Image (cartoon, grey):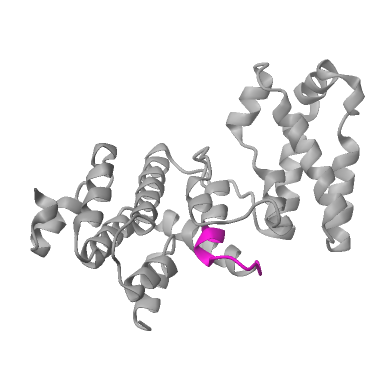
């Protein structure tokens, strides 16, 4: 098998398949069978970073992810916070697999809960307007109320969110009232909410990725998830290599190069 070959060339041939789902089990077996998974994991990381390296807009997005994560002070892995913001703003409708794998506790991190209020996009709009899953909008209203109750916000942001909350129809009005309100005012309300979150929390940007860029992001995300699963599997990886990989997950290439000079 290719995973049993020791040459770096053979391993490079293997990592060329890192974006292909049928090969995921091969990678998990490969790192588990190797006396040391360092070389394979480092090659995987290089190939994964290369997926988005030539797209300036995607590099700008990763730079934003990094900058936003640095503004949050939490006792958890920085890569987990980056994964959280990546998943909320990359327009992939992800299931937050990566951030959960990186052990981010959503229940206690109220600062990150602010992003729930702008985790709405065109797909949500169409879903609601088409008459399915009305609980999405109810959940959004509840999240906004919880944020205002739990978090201590700067006065201007507090006032802006209170004004948005005041525009919502009363819950006891029933689903039909929500539907009528949404059809008339929903899109405008979401636009206002997005503007507030961008202004005060630098989240909820409309990145307007092309379909090709979305596909690159999905491949990049899925491949990083596989990389983390390999790291967490029953394999031997040196502490140094593990730290290097975790420290540079979901970072723009310029930041990765800068950090590599420090290793």
Residue depicted at 65% across the width and 28% down the height:
125
Q: Is residue 160 visible?
A: no
* Relative vertical location of residue 169 with respect to residue 146 in this rendering, above or below: above
* Residue plotted at (42% across, 59% down): 59
Q: Nearer the viewer, residue 145 or 227?
A: 227
Q: Is residue 232 left or right of residue 9?
A: right
Residue farthest to the bottom, as pictured? 262
Residue 94, compared with residue 230, is above or below; it is above
Residue positioned 51% across, 46% down in the render: 90
Name the quadrant of the C terminus: bottom left
* Residue 142: x %, y % from top left: 80, 38
Query: Which residues are the magenta region?
Result: 72-82
Q: Is residue 213 magenta?
A: no
Residue at image position (44%, 60%) is: 250
Side (left or right) of 14 relative to 7: right
Locate residue 57, reporting x and y percent: 44, 55
Q: Which quadrant of the figure has residue 158?
A: bottom right
- Occupied quadrant, residue 39: bottom left
Residue 145 on image: x %, y %: 84, 43
């Amino acid at each position: 098998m290719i995973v049993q070959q020791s040459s770096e060339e053979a391993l490079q041939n293997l990592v060329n398949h890192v974006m292909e789902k049928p090969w995921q089990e091969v990678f998990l077996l490969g790192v588990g069978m190797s006396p040391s998974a360092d070389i394979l994991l480092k090659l995987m990381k290089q190939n994964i970073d290369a997926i988005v390296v030539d797209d300036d807009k995607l590099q700008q997005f990763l730079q934003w992810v990094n900058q936003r994560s640095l503004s949050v002070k939490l006792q958890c892995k920085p890569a987990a916070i980056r994964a959280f913001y990546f998943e909320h703003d990359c327009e992939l409708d992800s299931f937050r697999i990566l951030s959960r794998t990186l052990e981010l506790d959503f229940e206690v991190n109220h600062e990150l809960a602010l992003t729930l209020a702008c985790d709405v996009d065109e797909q949500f709009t169409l879903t609601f307007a088409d008459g399915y899953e009305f609980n999405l909008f109810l959940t959004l209203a509840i999240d906004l109320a919880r944020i205002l109750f739990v978090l201590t916000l700067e006065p201007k942001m507090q006032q802006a969110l209170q004004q948005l909350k005041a525009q919502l129809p009363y819950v006891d009005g029933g689903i039909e009232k929500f539907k009528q309100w949404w059809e008339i005012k929903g899109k405008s309300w979401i636009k206002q909410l997005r503007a507030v979150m961008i202004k005060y929390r630098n989240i909820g940007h409309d990145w307007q990725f092309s379909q090709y860029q979305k596909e690159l992001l999905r491949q990049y995300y899925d491949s990083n998830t596989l990389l983390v699963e390999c790291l967490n599997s029953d394999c031997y990886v040196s502490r140094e290599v593990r730290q290097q990989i975790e420290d540079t997950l979901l970072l723009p290439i310029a930041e990765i190069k800068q950090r590599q000079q420090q290793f």
